[in-house]
Structure formats: structure tokens, C-alpha cells
Image (cartoon, rainbow, N blue to C red):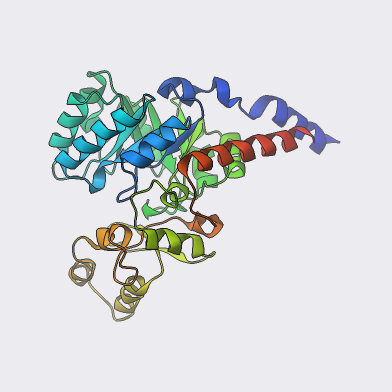
Amino acid sequence: MIGSLNLIILSENRIPDFMQHRITELFGIEYPIVQGGMIWASGWRLASAVSNAGGLGLLGAGSMYPEVLEEHIIKCKKTTDKPFGVNVPMLYPDIEKLMDIIVEQGVKIVFTSAGNPKTWTKFLQDKGIIVVHVVSSVKFALKAQEAGVDAVVAEGFEAGGHNGRDETTTMVLIPSVKEKITIPLIAAGGIATGRAMLAAMVLGADGVQVGSRFVASHEASSHEMFKQMIVQAKEGDTQLTLKELAPVRLLKNKFFQDIQQAYAKGVNMEELKELLGRARAKKGMFEGDMDEGELEIGQVSGLIHAISPAAQIVADLMAEFNQAKAEMCQY
């Protein structure tokens, strides 16, 4: 009886109404769904499609030269009248040029990552831009809040691409961060279904960021062979590696196995850098070299079974979210 009562209270009070949510109000969007700004996947076609479907589309500036980013922003503005943003890794060598273009082109939302949020937050906010910072721990969430960002993305260990060193899972990270901050919280890492979205929000998130699921979309600029490999992936087909350089979750291909063999031989840092080389991610995810390329994708790839239009992905997420929410309310 007590268990049933707790579920009734949960369904009535703790499952948020996404139509009146802090994230939808902050960004001016219909659904609390943010498309991850992933390198080699998140161009103007994907960002505008997600924004037109009611979420927040992001351009992934990490794989773009400044002039390429400008082109994508211009095309995005032509193909959607809805809000969209740009994800900027702060380790980018020409970041000043990127920021100048973002301001000149009137972008209203910027997600920053891989660096100190104090560096650019005030500069952007003084230009009327909403700033969100991506973190992998409570420590960095608090630093981001102290820097004055408008929201944080807390990304769990399940996520694809570059990851936190602490290996904190989304289920642990979200309530831990929620306990310590007051600004809006977006959950990321392992979220590709409406049920996962609901779970993240029950844990305390105000919205979700979805990456891997949108890589396997028609509009993603990633190579078709990479998309096919994602939908063929099974549980255990990804693993975090290269922690000495920058932890990254990869699909297990020949390049991944080469890394493992190098570790078995006692590879040092310089040898790892030589093995990684340059443009390894572009070679795999964008150019389609499934053997020698770096294939960044999340653990949740094992739950992705089809390449779909971005609008359908958003619709499916919301339909399953609402179905799961209704099922919870039956208890």
C-alpha cells in the first residue's frame, strides 16, 4: 500500500509537465529536447530539422572551420525560424573567430564545453546570448553555476565521444548535480528513448540532450556507413579508451583494437598520440573509413535500430515519453 501511495505521489507531483518547463521557457522551444552538437554529424540540416520539430537543434562547431560555421549558421537561419544554437568546444584553436561569427550572425544560444566556462560566458551574455555549459561532475557543475551560465548539461559516462574521467553514470550524476545547483539542468548520456527521457526528468533533469540517436538520422552529416554501423551495434560494442589523452567512447573497430594491442605492449603517451594521428574522427565518422577511423558513439547505440528522419525521432521521443508517463500514473 505504501509503495502504491509513493507512486501516486510521484505521478502527481514529480513527473514534470514539459509544456510548462524551465528548459522550454529558457530556449523558447516546444519540447525539452536538445540535439547534441556532435562533431561531423551536427550540420545545418540536422539542427534546423530538430528545431522545426519542436526541439533545440545545435550546430557542432568543433568540426568546422570558422567560414564553414558561418555558412551553416546562414543556412540554418534560412531553413528554420525556430531557435537553434551552436556547440563550441573551448579547446578549439580559432575559438575567437568562432565567437565573433556567432555574435555577428545573431545566434542566440551557445553551448560551451571542454574548458573553463568563465572564459566566454560574460562575453556572450553581454551580447544577449544564452550560455549553457557541458559538465561531467558536480564539481564542474558548481564551477559553471559560479561562472554565471544560464543552464548546465550534465553528461554521464554512457555518452559517446569525449567523456569525463570519473566515469560517473547518468543515473548517479543527474541527482547528484540536481542536489547542488539551482540553475536549469539538462541530462545527457544514454538517452535515446522517451522512457529514458522520463527517467532523467524524474531524477531531477529539466530537459534532455540527445546525441547518438540523432547521429542515426537522415539529416545528420555523418557518413552513411557510420550510421549503418550504429544501427547494427549491440550492447558492449562501445568502450571508453585513450584516457591518457582525452577519454573517448568508441565503437570497437580495427582502430580500437589497434589501441588495445598498443596498451598490451605498454604504449607510452607519445606513442598513443602517434597512433591517434590527425583527423582520425573525420576519417571514420565523416569520410566512412570503418576500419581506420575513430567512431565516436554512445552506449545507447545498442538501442538504435533504424536511421530515421530527425522529426520522426523527436515525435517518437515525445510519444514514448507521454506513454511512459501515463503508465506511471496508473499505479
**Which residue is at a point 23% across and 18% down the rendered structure image?**
126
Relative to 136, say whether 302 is above or below: below
Q: x, y (%) of residue 302?
A: 53, 60
Relative horizontal placement of residue 275, taking residue 43 as reference (left or right): left
Relative to 119, say whether 242 is above or below: below
Relative to 130, say whether 248 is above or below: below
**Which residue is at a point 59% across and 41% down the rendered structure image?**
194
Quarter of the image with the C terminus is top right
The outermost residue toward the front is 78
Relative horizontal placement of residue 195, taking residue 46 as reference (left or right): right
Quarter of the image with the N terminus is top right
Q: x, y (%) of residue 292?
A: 29, 71
Specify the quadrant of the image occupied by residue 153: top left
The outermost residue toward the right is 1
In the foreground, 186 or 210 = 210
Relative horizontal placement of residue 225, taking residue 114 as reference (left or right): right
Q: x, y (%) of residue 163?
A: 37, 52
Relative to 318, say whether 126 is above or below: above
In the foreground, 285 or 89 = 285
